Amino acid sequence: MGTTSIQLTGTIQKASPNLKGFDADTIITASQAEFFKNAGYAFCIRYLSREETQSANDLSYEEATIILNAGLALSAVQHVAGSGWSPSKSLGITYGANAVLNATAVGLPTGMNIWCDLEGIASNTSAQNVIDYCNAWYNEVNQAGYVPGLYVGAACILTGEQLYEDLKFKHYWKSLSTTPSIPTRGYQMIQSYEGNLIDGVGIDIDTTQNDELGDAVLWLKAN
């Protein structure tokens, strides 16, 4: 999938608190998007590739248009590497640059959150390597005009203090796993477990909130 010259229509909005949405690793069809909207879901989070191009199951311009046309707000998170991976500054640069390439190819406008998935890291990894990875990823995404966010999952290595003090991120999304609290700031989105398929789709539930500094998720919504 090459870079598209078409940009998705809509506006970047600050998420209101207490909205229920979902993240999914499968393509959302028009009928499913309509189902979720009618069932009270306010937003959808779909995936970007770590590689230079999107895979067949990742978010596309066409799917993004379907989600937005159904009245759901849209956000995007990059796939994490497999369990036991080893982050580094150079990998952060590569993955961050690829997040930008794929967000642009999908037609996502700058100014919205693009999320880095931080979980499943090898247990012998130093905190400094994780910090270097995260800040390198942040720089690539930020320089392109997107607003980097961090999904904090299990085995993220870093403490809450390191997540807040040593990283450049200002947007944090808490996974359904046990994760450290973010001092001073807190989380802007909380993930919870959904054990059943919803309209045939495997999802996790996500709920928005303002963090302790009054900031919130920035997503795309149709006008």
Image: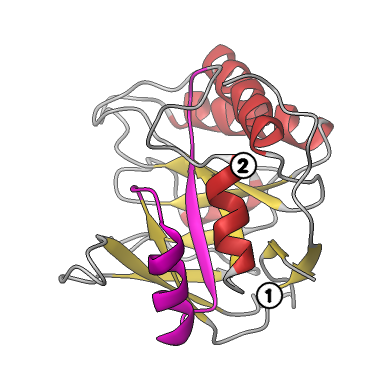
Q: Residue furthest top?
A: 90
For the point 64% across and 42% down, the residue is 166
Query: Where does label 1 land, which residue?
Result: 15
Query: Where does label 2 land, which residue?
Result: 61
Q: Amino acid at mark 2?
A: Tyr
Q: Report x, y in % for residue 194.
A: 23, 72
For marks 1 and 2, the one nearer the N-term is: 1
Residue 163 in view of the camera? no
For the point 81% across and 32% down, the residue is 144
Question: Quick one: SS at disc 2?
Answer: helix
Q: Residue furthest left?
A: 195
Q: What's the CA distance linking mark 1 and mark 2?
A: 22 Å
For the point 44% across and 22% down, the residue is 87
**Which quadrant holds residue 82?**
top left
Q: Nearer the viewer, residue 10 or 123?
A: 10
For the point 83% across and 39% down, the residue is 145
